[in-house]
Amino acid sequence: TAQVIAHADAAMYAVKRAGRGHYRVYTPELDTRARDAELRDAVENGELVLHFQPVVNLVGGDGIAVEALVRWNHPVRGLQMPGAFIELAEETGAIIPIGEWVLREACRQAVGWSTPTGEKVWLSVNVSARQVTQAGLVDTIREVLAETGFPADRLVLELTESVILQPDEQTVARLSTLREMGIGISVDDFGTGYAALSYLRTLPVSILKIDRSFVDGIDTDPDTYAVAEALVRLARAYRLHVVAEGIETAEQARCMAEMGCTFGQGYHFARPMPGPALADLLASGGVGSQMVAH
Ligand code: C2E
Ligand code: MG
Ligand code: MG
Ligand code: MG
């Protein structure tokens, strides 16, 4: 451990000396351990921050959502996006403390958020495979809800397809317990994982989030439109809510609404932003009842 810490210090020193963007890798294995140690410290040192992106209602009706997205405000390298550290955190297990922090912090910030028309505001939190296979997941969530006063029926957990492809019995039981508590279970990046759709019948999921790769081009290419439409129809056949991610143009929003997709998320509506900015946007009615005409 002393060696790892010494290495981490040396790496940090090298970073400081070389400046931003000149981080050098020495030994891959030690480097992983040093980066893991640094990441775990980041949680304790309060270097993680959350941004929130609205998920708007495309077809009217009650309710909108916000998705919590983690960032690492690194003292030397600056604001790091999840692509730069989540994979490592999943490999090393650092995702467990990170995930718990994200859940608690997201609930803490979002508990008071509301729109002028009093719509429901759901909160989506991304949860990794490592967290879902943890025996303590349900207890952790119960604890966070009790502590923050966040209502269970406004919380949604986003899982990727790889998590739920072949879940063990305890994982299925855990997800069922969460559903019984009123928590939503969403399949994130739907369509990018495995073609096995049978899990939709057996798993207690409530929402499909169509990956943005299927949204890209729906406004210009009829074949792409047809595939996205098929995914929406599939979701509806399973009586699931459906969210389209990565909506970047008004025309894409119109197309998704036309297909009967209830919710949309993307830069066209809003980019991820700090909690206070999102709270203001919600309070001003800026993203509530964003009905898209079609
Ligand atoms: P995701 O859950 O699919 O989140 C959506 C990602 O798409 C976000 O990237 C968001 O900024 C981006 N995005 C939203 N609208 C648009 C758009 O219109 N166009 C484009 N090109 N991109 C858009 P971000 O914040 O970099 O997050 C990337 C991924 O990292 C997330 O994908 C999620 O899988 C993971 N992640 C983020 N926060 C957490 C976390 O707290 N825990 C875990 N386990 N994973 C997280
Ligand atoms: Mg997500
Ligand atoms: Mg997604
Ligand atoms: Mg995605």
Image (cartoon, rainbow, N blue to C red):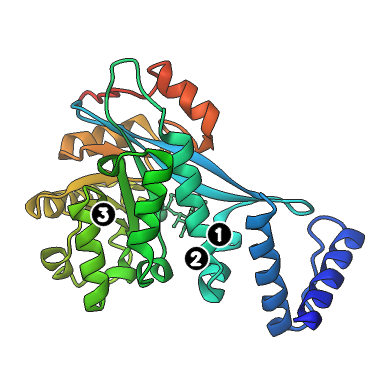
Measure how far apart labels 2 and 3 are at the Cα level.
19 Å
SS at mark 3 in the image:
strand
Q: Are marks 1 and 3 in contact (CB under 8 Å)?
A: no
At x 38%, y 34%, the residue is: 249
Q: Position of residue 212 (x, y in %)?
A: 36, 50
The amino acid on which the numbered mark 2 sits, given as a three-letter code, is Ile
Q: CA distance from mark 2 to mark 1?
A: 17 Å
Please state the horizontal and vertical placement of residue 168, each as a whole percent of the image: 25, 78
Helix, strand or loop at mark 1: helix
Structural distance between the alpha carbons of marks 1 and 3: 23 Å
- Ligand 1 within 8 Å, label 1 CB: yes
Residue 185's mark?
Answer: 3
Instruction: Please say if 170 is above or below 177.
Output: below
Q: Amino acid at mark 1?
A: Gly
Q: Residue 221, percent across and down? A: 28, 47
In screen coordinates, is 229 left or right of 211? left
Q: Residue 290 bears which disc, if any? A: none
Residue 83: give its label: 1
Q: Which residue is mark 2?
A: 96
Where 149 falls versus 7 (above or below)? above
Foreground disc of the pair 2, 1: 2
Seen from the viewer's position, the closer of residues 15 and 58 is: 15
